[in-house]
Image (cartoon, rainbow, N blue to C red):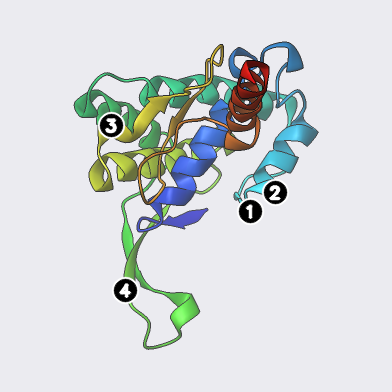
Amino acid sequence: MEFPLHDYVAGARVATDLVTTSPTVRGPAGDGLPSPEALAAFLADHDLRLDAPPPTATDLFQVQLLRREARGIIETETADQAVAGCAVLMRRAALGPVLRRDAAAGVDGRWRWHVPTAPGAPLADELAAFLAAGLAGVVRALGHGRFRDCAAPGCRGVFADTSRTGRRRFCRPELCGNRVKVANHRARQAVR
């Protein structure tokens, strides 16, 4: 696997989405990654093409552990702690950055930094490097304050806010945000 350093948003998005698959966040709905097939679907949904073969039960277990590590980085109290956590994840599979022309722009394309992962690295280690680059990019470009707890009552989710305005409030806007909107609407209707 090789991923561009300039697109930290993709890594941060995958980190947030991975964290929200946790039973801690999903509650009664259970684990969002209950099987290797569910993990394969998660990777496909995020357009991640890792060098590793299709996920196994061992890969699933390792990614579930990685999910805790990603949550730990988002929950850090300081930028230094977050960056240190990202460095640990990067060391699992990332090799030194390389400079390559942007293939999408053709021969005259801009030069961009890319990070390759070690050949034969386990799936969870490749994914760890990708998530770490994304989360470290959030700290560098947007600041540690973009790591937040979900504002929905009762939700234990956390997320990296990579929105342009920096006003995201929910780990899963389509679920947590909608629940809050419905509750607020019902409260307004009850007052009438």
The residue where tag 4 is placed is 111
Q: Position of residue 37 (x, y in %)?
A: 79, 35
- Distance from Cα at disc 3 to Cα at disc 1: 28 Å
The residue where tag 1 is placed is 47
Left or right of 30 on screen, residue 153: left
- The image quadrant of residue 41 is top right
Which residue lies at the image location 27% right of the left edge and 33% below the top edge? 144
- Distance from Cα at disc 4 to Cα at disc 2: 27 Å
The residue where tag 3 is placed is 145
Q: Label 2: state its secondary structure.
A: helix
Q: Amino acid at mark 1?
A: Asp
The residue where tag 2 is placed is 44
Marks 3 and 2: which is nearer the front?
3
User: Between 115 and 186, which is closer to the camera in this rendering?
Assistant: 186
Q: Position of residue 179 (x, y in %)?
A: 64, 25
Which residue lies at the image location 62% right of the left edge and 17% below the top edge? 191
- Distance from Cα at disc 1 to Cα at disc 4: 23 Å
Contact, CB < 8 Å: mark 1 with mark 2? yes
Contact, CB < 8 Å: mark 3 with mark 1? no
Q: Position of residue 153 (x, y in %)?
A: 54, 14
Asked whether residue 87 is in view, the answer is: yes
Q: Label 1: state its secondary structure.
A: loop
Marks 3 and 1: which is nearer the front?
3
Contact, CB < 8 Å: mark 3 with mark 2? no
- Distance from Cα at disc 4 to Cα at disc 3: 30 Å
Answer with mark 1 or mark 4, whichever residue precedes in sequence.
1
